[in-house]
Image (cartoon, grey):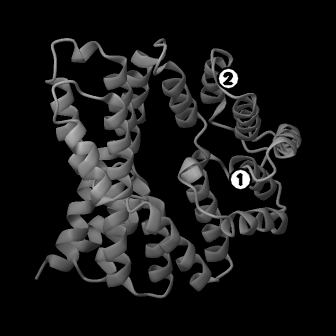
Amino acid sequence: FDEAIGYFSQMLDSKNVSYKALEKLILLIRRAGRLADVPRFITRAEKSSARAAMEPGLHYCKGLLARHMRNSQEALLELNQARKDGEWGSKATCVMIDIYLDPDQLGDEANQPSPMNDKVKMAKALRLDLTNVKPVKLMLYEGYEMLMSQHKPTVEACIDKFSKVLEIEKDCVDALLGMSYALRMLKQEPKARNHLKRISKMQYNAEEADELERSYLLLADMYIQSNKNDLAQELCRKCLQYNKSCAKAWEFQGLIFEKEASYADAAQVYEMAWQFDNKRNPAVGFKLAFNYLKAKRFVDAINICNEVLKVQPNFPKIRKEILEKARASLRP
């Protein structure tokens, strides 16, 4: 990573800033686990010319950074500024659709009331506005829209949509992953697991990096639930090998240590998850505070509770189960 980061950093030292170089630099720095280094490059780009603030390429890069810093609203605002541009418009629109159709927001089963309907509508409107994109990509987006509905007949129908993609591209990771999400939601976990195992044996490629990462994590989640912790750890390490900023992989490792009652070790990796989620995921903050409490790091537990409550003031149980207990433990 370091050599490539150095190369793209030099490209940004010139007066004529290359936004393509900045885009690649953001992706590389993220994978190196150094996202905190990116803002200075953004600032450098902003100061490079009087017109920089109006440049669609800069808006795209700022949106990309905001997305990886878990600030979806800011990301959407920045990306929207680039959406009508001839060079950056399609890319910006695709990232916006990816934010709206984030599978991490899915429930565990079909026919649950979906909180995703408005987001699916936004994603569909953006998809219909897309040009210069492969037909297969549009089919995938349509399949994920159907998946995110969480309506059982529609989820069943999305499997056919993903199957049609696989007829065109037989090893399309995104289609196999979408099918796996659908099958799991339909309580057909063995079939889902088989697709994910197939993906895990594929050669890694940077073009499908995000889809491969999600596949490894979904399979790791299944392994954790069936107490196959060694297999889950292996997949988490694989994620982190390619992306040190992968908060979910750190979180899963913390969950494994927590299940083994290794609270100090769990806290150590939950710290990484909390940092790489940009301290915006209250569920991870809760787990970190809980493990600090169990490891008798009471001051740390209190500090994290306060950070979580800033993000979500009514986060359930954290006051009673962690904050009050940690405070009581500090009293003589």
- In the image, what residue type sits under mark 2? Lys
Q: Few, some or many C-alpha atoms within 10 Å of disc 1 (few <14, some 14-19, many ≥20)?
A: many
Q: Residues within 10 Å of mark 2 (few under 14, many from 20)?
A: some
Pointer 1 residue: 177
Find residue 167 and report its horizontal and vertical position in percent: 87, 44
Q: Which residue is mark 2?
A: 124
Residue 52: x %, y % from top left = 23, 17
Alpha carbons under labels 2 and 1: distance apart? 20 Å
Q: Is residue 277 visible?
A: no
Q: Earlier in the sequence, mark 2 or mark 1?
A: 2
- Residue at (60%, 22%) from the top-left corner? 122
Nearest to viewer (mark 2 / mark 1): 1
Q: Give the residue displayed 63% in from the left and 34% down from the top.
A: 116
Q: Considering depth in this image, is 224 or 42 the residue closer to the camera?
A: 42
Please tell me whether residue 302 is drawn above or below residue 46 in the rendered image: below
Cβ atoms under marks 2 and 1 closer than 8 Å: no
Secondary structure beneath disc 2? helix
Question: What amino acid does circle 1 point to?
Answer: Leu
